[in-house]
Image (cartoon, helix red, strand yellow):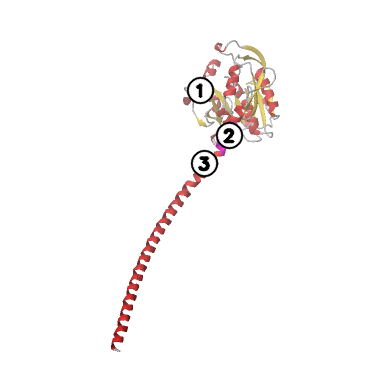
Amino acid sequence: MHGRLNEVTGEVARRTDQLADRLETLQRSNEAQAELLRRMSDDLARARERIEGLEDTLRHRLPPIEQAIGAVPAMFGPRFDELEMKARPPVPYGPGRIAVRLADGYVVAPDRDPAVVAQLVNATTGGFEPGTRRCLVRLLEPGMGVADVGAHIGLLTVAAARAVGPAGKVFAFEPEDEPRGCLERTLHLNGLAWVALSPAAAGRASGPQTFHVSPILGHSSLYALPSDEGEARAVTVEVVRLDDAVPRRQRLDVVKIDVEGAELDVLAGMPRLLKANPDIAVIAEYGPSHLKRVGIAPKAWMDAFRAHGFRAHAISEIDGSARRVALKDLARVESVNLAFVRPGGAAERRLLA
């Protein structure tokens, strides 16, 4: 009996030791699992911090990326359009004329002057003066009125007509027969019925006057031409004052003047328009060599515009931007188109936008 009891007691002791070992093992296992859970919790916290950091980075970086992606079609679309236009060859358009596709439509030009044809074909779709075109279009809105004095073959005439649309009006003046004939066909070809084309020159007094036709297309003038341009041909043309040529009830928002030194004559013939349209803008070519030829000092030329309340802004032909300038800023300039606007008006805001 006593032996049996010892045997049972020993078995119980062994079982107890085994249970204690298992309990210790379980405890160690639980501690290991707890440590593992703690490490996993720390890793998870660090991962969350990284994710939050990435989210912050993305929040700052995504808008510029999305904006850049969104700008891709706008950036490449016009480039592709320009390439498509320029890939089209000049089209014969009647005897002695060709039609070239530019941004605002087909422009008709004479083919007798290879230099002009080459320049037109090789120019961007903005034409000979792409910056001035962009500036002109920026100044205009649908329904506005424009006078294009010295329209030539009409590159800026067409741009202005597209900008103001059928609700607007463009008055184009070109006294030289050949470029005016080209412009006449350009208007017909593009369906620009709201452009009124006049064979007159604009000046300070109405009546017939001698017009000097240069052998270089676009260099003709009411004033005698320099001898180094070759032999000029004198013809008689009708000169009109803009005040008389533009109807009294017609608003006029922009006047573009390209008349080889006769700019102040045009300005002198439009006092009514300058007064009746306080927010009018004038784009005029400043060429010291032209002014010297006609006997006008650059200061007198600038003062004439300043007397009407205008500030001068030089137009960049690269990007169409305009920066305010004084006469001293133009000391070394051979030729530049200036945009004149009155300070504080809507025209100035559009010009500098």
Relative depth, front residue between 260 and 91: 91
> Which residue is found at the position 68% from the left and 20% from the top?
181
Mark in front: 3 vs 1: 3
Q: Secondary structure at mark 3?
A: helix
In three-dimensional space, the C-alpha distance between marks 2 and 3, rounded to whole angstroms, equals 16 Å
Q: What are the residue bounds of the magenta stretch?
A: 73-81
How packed is label 2: few (under 14 Cα within 10 Å), some, or many (20 or more)? few
Identified by mark 1, the residue type is Lys
Residue picked out by circle 2 = 78
Asked if residue 76 lies in the magenta stretch, the reply is yes
In three-dimensional space, the C-alpha distance between marks 1 and 2, rounded to whole angstroms, equals 41 Å
How packed is label 1: few (under 14 Cα within 10 Å), some, or many (20 or more)? few
> Picture coordinates of residue 238 (x, y %)?
68, 18
- Main structural element of the magenta stretch: helix, strand or loop? helix
The image quadrant of residue 344 is top right
In three-dimensional space, the C-alpha distance between marks 3 and 1, rounded to whole angstroms, equals 46 Å
- Which mark, by number, is residue 299? 1
- Which mark, by number, is residue 307? none
Residue picked out by circle 3 = 68
309 shown above or below 18 = above
